[in-house]
Image (cartoon, rainbow, N blue to C red):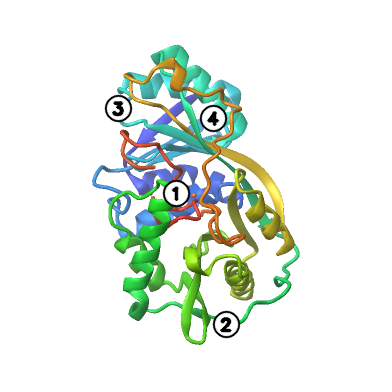
């Protein structure tokens, strides 16, 4: 039983690709981040190269994987319990400066945080807790708001960048310019605007389809247009379009601190798949009083239009995976968050 790490994307996909694709909805963030790195290059999420890894059990099969694009948290799949301690030992041996946090299923990140404290003495904060949903019974919002959906084009670039930046400021997840993420999403038809009288009022995005799965996010409505149902209508439209394009699964993430968006997504036909958390490991100068128990819930949420500001993939940076530099709270990868979550 051992971890193998590499900085080579092709090697990672050759060894861990089948494992990730066997459960594409559950592993959507790692899959779409890896795909973005393949398409956009390994510096798509920052100047430092990514880190990949996979765990082989006694039988020689891959049973877990990790992906990190510094300065964002380490993304983890589900792991056997016996894989957690060796992973922490390996990361701690390399120095913890580039491990600002961890992002994964609740039980996995809680086990990781406990082991991390044993090896480094560092505590943690719960930055966000998310619920993952899959589209099981597509439904339109009721009532359907005025307007219509259209796919964003390069002519919308300036508006989209402003909206990505606004979302990042509201949620504390803005890191660098989102221009590259916007260009990438527009390039594959991954951003849809809801318009009223030819005026954009809301945004819903989707990742590229990977292993038959599409993730919705970002979802955003400017403050002055909220509580009119626009984001819900845009979200319903991109889900419908993904299924029509051949997706077998459509998934999204919602911040558990935002009950309004969670309720909306369920009205649109999304059903819970599981819960995840983003934990932040503060710098050594942070006091123990700053830490929260792993089961504590971060109360921050974007607020606004129901379904319009909940993190989804929508998600390691403003775009599509599921955090900023170490000095700031480590948000989930942009490709996962509903803010502008790597991907």
Q: Quadrant of residue 80?
A: top right
Q: Residue furthest right?
A: 137
Residue identified by numbered label 2:
148
Residue 284, given in percent of the width and then of the height, sits at 33, 19
User: Could you give the CA–CA distance between mark 4 and mark 1, rounded to whole angstroms?
Assistant: 22 Å
Whether residues under marks 1 and 2 lie with C-beta atoms below 8 angstroms apart, the answer is: no
User: Could you give the CA–CA distance between mark 4 and mark 3, rounded to whole angstroms?
Assistant: 18 Å
User: Could you give the CA–CA distance between mark 1 and mark 3, rounded to whole angstroms?
Assistant: 24 Å
Q: Quadrant of residue 72?
A: top left
Residue identified by numbered label 1:
171
For this view, does 22 lie left or right of residue 4? right
In what quadrant of the picture does the C terminus appear?
Answer: bottom left
Query: First in sequence: mark 4 or mark 3?
Result: 3
Whether residues under marks 1 and 3 lie with C-beta atoms below 8 angstroms apart, the answer is: no
Residue identified by numbered label 3:
97
Of residue 65 and residue 17, the one placed in the foreground of this image is 65
Q: Residue at x 75, y 65 (%)?
A: 137
Residue 252, given in percent of the width and then of the height, sits at 59, 55
Q: Quadrant of residue 19?
A: top right
Query: First in sequence: mark 1 or mark 3?
Result: 3
Q: Residue at x 63, y 55 (%)?
A: 261
Count of picture labels = 4
Whether residues under marks 2 and 4 lie with C-beta atoms below 8 angstroms apart, the answer is: no
Tag 2: Cα neighbours inside 10 Å, few (<14), some, or many (≥20)? some
For this view, does 323 lie left or right of residue 129? left
Residue identified by numbered label 4:
109
Element on which disc 3 rests: loop
């Amino acid at each position: 039983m051992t971890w193998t790490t590499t900085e080579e994307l092709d090697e990672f996909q050759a060894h861990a690709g089948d494992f990730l694709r066997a459960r594409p909805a559950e592993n959507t963030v790692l899959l779409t981040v890896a795909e973005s790195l393949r398409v956009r290059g390994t510096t798509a999420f920052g100047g430092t190269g990514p880190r990949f890894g996979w765990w082989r059990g006694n039988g020689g099969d891959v049973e877990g994987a990790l992906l990190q694009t510094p300065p964002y948290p380490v993304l983890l799949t589900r792991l056997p319990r016996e894989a957690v301690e060796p992973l922490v030992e390996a990361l701690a041996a390399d120095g913890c400066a580039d491990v600002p946090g961890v992002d994964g299923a609740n039980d996995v990140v809680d086990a990781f945080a406990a082991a991390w404290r044993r090896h480094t003495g560092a505590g943690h904060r719960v930055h966000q807790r998310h619920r993952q949903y899959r589209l099981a019974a597509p439904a339109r919002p009721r009532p359907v708001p005025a307007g219509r959906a259209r796919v964003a084009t390069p002519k919308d670039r300036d508006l989209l960048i402003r909206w990505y930046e606004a979302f990042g400021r509201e949620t504390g997840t803005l890191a660098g310019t989102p221009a590259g993420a916007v260009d990438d999403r527009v390039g594959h038809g991954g951003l849809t605007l809801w318009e009223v009288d030819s005026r954009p009022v809301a945004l819903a995005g989707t990742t590229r389809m990977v292993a038959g799965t599409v993730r919705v996010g970002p979802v955003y409505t400017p403050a002055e247009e909220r509580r009119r149902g626009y984001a819900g209508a845009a979200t319903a439209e991109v889900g419908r379009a993904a299924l029509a394009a051949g997706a077998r699964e459509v998934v999204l993430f919602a911040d558990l601190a935002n009950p309004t968006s969670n309720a909306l997504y369920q009205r649109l036909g999304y059903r819970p798949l599981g819960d995840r958390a983003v934990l932040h490991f503060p710098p050594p100068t942070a006091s123990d009083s700053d830490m929260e128990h792993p089961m504590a819930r971060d109360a921050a949420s974007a607020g606004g239009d129901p379904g319009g500001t909940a993190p989804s993939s929508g998600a390691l940076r403003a775009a599509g995976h599921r955090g900023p530099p170490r000095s700031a709270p480590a948000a989930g990868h942009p490709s996962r968050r509903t803010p502008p979550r790597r991907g």
